[in-house]
Amino acid sequence: MSATNRSKLIAKLHAALKKHYKVPPASPSRPLLEHALYACLLEDCPGELADEGLAKLEQDYFDWNEVRVTTATEIAGVLSSLPDSNKAASRLKSTLQSIFEEFYSFDLDHLKKENLGKAVAKFEKLPGISPFVLSYIIQHGLGGHSIPIDYSAMVIMLVTGIASQSEASDGRVPGLERAIPKSKGIEFANLLHQPAVALTIDANDKTARALIDSVVKGSSSGLDEWLNSKEAAKKRVAQRKAEEREVAKQEAAAIEEAEPVAAVPSGKKKPIRSAAKATSTTNKPKPKKSTQASASAAPTKKTDKSSDAKSNSETKSTKTKTAKTSAESADVAKPAEKKSTTKKTTAKKATKTDSDQSTASKKPAKKSAKKTSSAKAGSETAKPTTKSASSATAKKSTNRKLTKRKPR
């Protein structure tokens, strides 16, 4: 829409508002903070109920800081006379909280002395303030020119064709402050607020429908279409949410069915949960249980007795081994002794023959004597060798200490 056509429609709307509605009395002078809180209650609500709600808050609470720390449900209980007390309570609480976090006090009158642009910029930074509340603060508290338009007033602008759907979603009507002068801004805002709230409370209000039909013919039918589309949109949203809930329930049931059963029946192996655990358990060989580990893990009287029996058997086996070795050494020594006795007998016979043959020469006698002496020496050397062998085997057998094994 062109700017000229829009300005003409706005002027026509202003004239129709004067015909169908009366101009309300001027609002009393309030501090800047109270203007902000009153705007939170006035949005989409009649002025009389907003005045009543503000008076209740001032009566029931000690100061605005107490209202700030109070829950939204308690504030909504105090503002129960409002059409939508929950939204009004949440707006009021969020506005108080954002103002306190920004200024650390509830005295905002010093902003009136500052430049309008700087003061507006400070309020625009606050996250809990809606566009309607900001425009009301600029118009009534700071003395600027900004016409507050709430949701109900935007419906009239949309039905009459002054604002498009995209502009209505942004919450601003371009060219509105140009078409309405600053001196008529408060009057136009108060007049527009009356039919807008009446249509939100009752969509079949006759005076409000007559007003919009006087601006643009067929606006009331357009309002019905918009209301029907709004209800259909609400139904679609509710149906979509229900479908999403059903899908979420089905997914949750599928996940529960897919989860493995925690209890494993007896006689069956537990399933391997991860591949890493499977490789670590299957590749590594299982360690064999040793008697030493079992003895060290649980040292009891029975294990002590078994260790004593084992030590006794080991001592018996060592004794038998030493007996065998001594017997073998004795068997080896016997043939050596026989050889020595045979040599002795031969030496005696040789001496007898030498004595009988006195005529023989001295040299052969000396040789026989040498032979006898060598035989004696051989017999004497044979005896100590046998003794040394037996003693060595005995020493080997005795040097081995028989220690009793202690349990670990």
Image (tube, grey):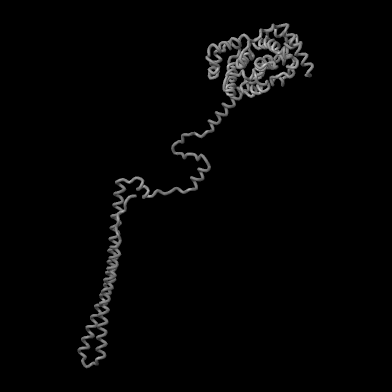
Q: Residue at x 75, y 18 (%)?
A: 175
Q: Where is residue 310 in the image (x, y as percent from the top left)?
A: 31, 53
Q: Quadrant of residue 99?
A: top right
> Image height check: is 235 above or below 18?
below
Q: Where is residue 298 in the image (x, y as percent from the top left)?
A: 34, 45
Q: Which residue is drawn at 69% across and 6% down?
A: 22
Work out whether residue 196 or residue 193 is closer to the camera in this orientation and state it: 193
**Which image quarter holds the N terminus?**
top right
Which quadrant of the view contains residue 195? top right
Q: Is residue 366 left or right of residue 216?
A: left
| Residue 352, above or below 39 | below
Q: Which residue lies furthest to the front in this view?
A: 113
Residue 383, quarter of the rendered image: bottom left
| Residue 165 x %, y % | 72, 19
The answer to whether residue 206 shows anywhere in this view is no
| Image spot of residue 39 (x, y percent) | 63, 15
Asked if residue 377 can be seen in this view, the reply is yes
Q: In the visual, does 285 lie left or right of 68?
A: left
Left or right: 287 in relation to 17? left
Q: Nearer the viewer, residue 166 or 404?
A: 166
Image mark count:
0
